Amino acid sequence: MSKFKIKTLVLSLPLLAALSTAAFAAGFSDAQTKTFAASPKSDYLAGTHQKMGLQCVSCHPSEVTDGEKEINQKCTSCHGDLDALATKTQSQNPNPHKSHLGKIQCTACHSGHEPSVAYCTNCHDFPSMKTMKQGKGANQPNFKEDLAKYDNAAPTKVEKTQLLVVGSGAAGFVAAMTARDAGIKDIIMIEKMAIPGGNSQLAAGGMNAAGTKFQKEKGIEDNPELMFKDTMKGGKNASNPDLAKILAEQSNASIEWLAQKGAVLSNVGRGGGSSAARMHGPAGGAFVGPYLSKFFRDKAEETGLDLRLNSKLVKLITDKSGNVVGALVKGKHSGIYRIDAKAVILATGGIGANADLVQALRSDISKDIKTSNQPGSQGDGMLLAQKIGADVVDVKEIQLNPTLLVGSPVIVSEIVRGAGAVFVNKEGKRFISELTTRDVTSAAVSKQTGGVAYEIFDQGIRDKVKQLGAAFELGLAKEGNSLAELAKNTGINPDNLVKTIEQYNKYADSGKDPDFNRPGISVKIGQPKYYAIEITPAIHYYMGGLKIDKNSRVVNKDGKPINGLFAAGEVTGGVHGKNRLGGNSISETITFGRIAGQSAAELIQK
């Protein structure tokens, strides 16, 4: 995602007059606006507007909601929406308004009364975004917080709802949609970040599903039993077989459910550790995460879902019998308040951005290793559920993804390897089958010179795989008209690279890889131009998490379900065992999101 570097505001005289006139409406006194004008905060964005003749109510009412929707409506009424602004700033590199996360609110970056911070810099190292015009001296927000300080917090108000969903990734949205279809109309969804989507919006590869009509149309033979066996094998047979079986057996139904709702995943590719091509994505090879996230946001808007951004879960509330009956929420503007609910669904994601927690669980993982997770992945939901007695499983199982794009937090999708890309090291030699599991591949890449490797591909693969777009947009893909030129531009041993690819192409012709037994080898690297992407392992996924049963009910340490508490997605453990196969995460969020939503609805309707 790219964000804003404010330039001087240019407003039409009639609009300026209209807004200035509005400033005299009830809500802010002249004394308040004068006090603000004399304060140090007048150097920030609100002060910039004020110096142009605008006053407080020109941009917002006296009370601002946590999601700041009303402020953003004012922003876009004057400056245009994100697409319009991206057109105006397209000469900048990177374009500060071009977003890969969909429709992003202005206030995700721009703050009126404190320094503005480009949201992109939570993940990307963009020097041009480090200093914003109204952001000098700004510090990057810290999303890690000691939740114990809210143990005895008193709410300023109490609200009631039938269902509270915590987290706005795929699992959360699917759970809310399913519950609504089951008859639950009173639903609140809270999201602690300024934008919805969680880690789901970053998913590049696809969604594993077996026995789908899209596979059959392409002549791909697959079935749930084979997907189950692959999942168990990939997880070193440590997965909960009941959950892994649900994942496989319900995968086709989840693909159909999405299609019926309007999200069609008709493209099919192959991921590491899978015996068949079953990784489903949008037609044309687009990223599955942004595609689904936009779909879910649009559906939420259509149905009027009460989605509250900048709203953080800080405590789960139980009654005397241990039933979950609500939660304490910390709103950016509203402060601490309580939501009473008949059921709570946790869809809060994993722990990948919480370096301290990762270190506490796995001291063998280097403190310096990067993460592909969005910054909100702090493990809050798991930690808060543990405080009320929830059990956890596979807590040390943290997955490294072998293909973090060096120089960014972007994961190069397994679709690229599945389409024919070849792994080589700095010496220009292959060292592993490109389609083995992530844990094995990460370990192998870590042992190469500099702890990095390269994915080598040609023009044919680039044209076929849209997931490669980010590497080129970020300027992190090297190219050459020949393999020797590519090697020179990349720093790979040229003689070895040429020999390696020549030998690989012979294997592709024969359909057999005697060196590393790459399955289904058939695509040659021989169509100029040639490309290389440097990759390295990074913290990617948490296989551990809350223990759930087949109905997505959170289980306590006595093995009994905690009444009123459900969970789905990366906050849960047990599905993936010691290693997650690429494509199984999105599949998990959709399938168990559906189960959690249905189970919660049934409890509410009892």
Image (cartoon, rainbow, N blue to C red):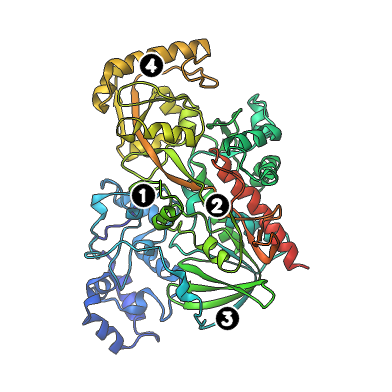
Q: Quadrant of residue 324?
A: bottom right
Q: Secondary structure at mark 4?
A: helix
Q: CA distance from mark 1 to mark 2?
A: 28 Å
Q: Which of pointers 1 and 2 indicates the residue nearer the eye?
A: 2
In the image: residue 138, left or right of residue 238:
left
Of callouts 3 and 2, the N-terminal one: 3
* Amino acid type, residue under disc 3 in the picture: Val
* Amino acid type, residue under disc 4 in the picture: Ile
Q: Which residue is mark 1?
A: 98
Q: Is residue 19 placed above or below 80 in the rendered structure?
A: below
Q: Which residue is mark 3?
A: 158
> Could one spot residue 221 in this view of the protein?
yes
Identify which residue is drawn at 43% across, 27% down.
463
* Amino acid type, residue under disc 2 in the picture: Glu
Where does the image place residue 299, in percent across and percent down from the top left? 58, 56
Of callouts 1 and 4, the N-terminal one: 1
- Comparing 435 with 366, the one in front is 366
Q: Which of pointers 3 and 4 indicates the residue nearer the eye?
A: 4
Of callouts 4 and 2, the N-terminal one: 4
Q: CA distance from mark 3 to mark 2?
A: 29 Å
Q: CA distance from mark 3 to mark 4?
A: 65 Å
Q: Secondary structure at mark 2?
A: loop
In the image: residue 41, left or right of residue 82:
left
Where does the image place residue 440, in percent across and percent down from the top left? 48, 33
Q: Residues within 10 Å of mark 1 (few under 14, many from 20)?
A: many
- Comparing 422 with 319, the one in front is 319
- Comparing 164 with 215, the one in front is 164
- Comparing 398 with 419, the one in front is 398
Badges 4 and 2: C-beta atoms under 8 Å apart? no
Of callouts 1 and 2, the N-terminal one: 1
